[in-house]
Image: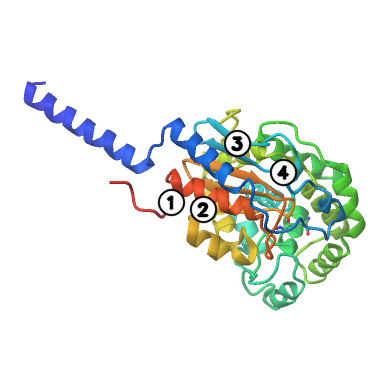
Amino acid sequence: MNGRHRNILIGISLVAAMGVTMHTGAQTPGDIQQAVDAAYAKFRTLQEGKNADYIPALAKVDPNLFGIAVVTADGKVYTAGDVKTEVSIQSISKVFTMAQVIEEQGLDSVEKQIGVDATGARFNSIIAVEAVRTVVGSGAPEMNPLVNPGAISATSMVRGATSDAVWQKIIGFHNDAAGRQLTVLQDVYKSESDTNQRNQAIGALMLAYGYIKNNWQQAVDLYTRQCSIGVNARDLATMGATLAAGGRNPVSGKQVMNSSKVPGVLAVMATAGLYDDSGKWLYHTGLPAKSGVGGGIVAVSPGKFGIAVVSPPLDDAGNSIRAQRAIADISNAIGGNPYAPRAK
Ligand code: DON
């Protein structure tokens, strides 16, 4: 290689390297920790919203609990506040049970049997169940696995000879995504089991209309149990990072799901992850995300990071107020929005 060619090659390499930097909007560890600390300080004293109380055990959780965690796609962890205390995962479990069904039975299975469209109704709407029933057999239902009827259906689709066999698969998938053994918060499980008549009605209707093929009682029970899994902010951020990193848990190194199936999971999160407020959320952050009435929200910046906040007080749509604000601030500060133009 002569000198001129070498110089051209060095020039091309430099441009490529700059291109990569511009593409990732590369942040230093200091930048990320600073954004996390700034959001913690800004929202720690925010007193808005109210714990969910339709599940009695949730009303008793400390409303001041506030923890933030970011786990990058290469496994670095940044935290602020309380990232150890567990809350019940609630609806965030819907993402991982949906992911498990997609992993086991393919993207088509969820699209055809449950649907991947927003319902435009609240997460536990029975009217939404009535609205979709006429399209059974004539196309994909206008439903999705992140609202209760679709989530109970997704749980019913997990294959297993016994209830315990199905449960082992569900908790196993959550464990792999979090990178540790999670356990059920028994007080929450009991409290929700005692008061989940509405979900039982939804399960029975989903059987009546052909979305659940059998044993709706088992599906509702396992759904209630998966919602009672205890997680902290760091667990949730690791679960988000697993999706950000193409299905590979970047902390444990385990490939939890096939990377080709992850975009489907993220698409449903973008469409329906924050219920009635999913559009507003996407408008401001561009991030696929999922909330739970236990106070957690997890969001995913594909290829970059998972981020989670735990803070129990919720807004009227059922989404944690501090979590929404902190995640939006941090992600926007560190270039998390996949729709944002590349930095110049
Ligand atoms: O089925 C329920 O009502 C709860 N186990 C889960 C609801 C939930 O987390 C909705 N979240 N925003």
Amino acid carrying label 1: it is Pro
Q: What kind of element bears circle 3?
A: strand
Sequence order check: which comes first, mark 3 or mark 4? 4
- Rendered position, 248 above or below 344: above
- Rendered position, 146 above or below 11: below
Q: Which of 266 and 300 is in front in this view?
A: 300
Give the residue pinned by disc 1.
338
Estimate how packed mark 2 is, as few (under 14), some (14 to 19) or many (20 or more) residues with alpha carbons within 10 Å: many
Give the residue pinned by disc 3.
80
Report how far apart the C-alphas of labels 4 and 2 lie in the structure: 24 Å
Are the residues at dot 2 and dot 3 in contact (C-beta closer than 8 Å)? no
Location of residue 154 in the rendering, given as x and y in whole percent from the top left corner = 72, 56
Are the residues at dot 4 and dot 1 in contact (C-beta closer than 8 Å)? no
Q: Nearer the viewer, residue 316 or 108?
A: 316
For residue 65, the mark is: 4
Sequence order check: which comes first, mark 4 or mark 1? 4
Q: Nearer the viewer, mark 3 or mark 1?
A: 3
Amino acid carrying label 4: it is Leu
Q: Is residue 13 at least partly visible in the picture? A: yes
Estimate how packed mark 1 is, as few (under 14), some (14 to 19) or many (20 or more) residues with alpha carbons within 10 Å: some
Q: Residue at x 48, y 56 (%)?
A: 286
Q: In which quadrant of the rendered view does residue 243 lie? A: top right
Q: Residue at x 74, y 58 (%)?
A: 50
Q: Nearer the viewer, residue 125 or 258?
A: 125
Report how far apart the C-alphas of labels 3 and 4 lie in the structure: 12 Å
Are the residues at dot 2 and dot 1 in contact (C-beta closer than 8 Å)? yes
Give the residue pinned by disc 2.
287
Amino acid carrying label 2: it is Leu
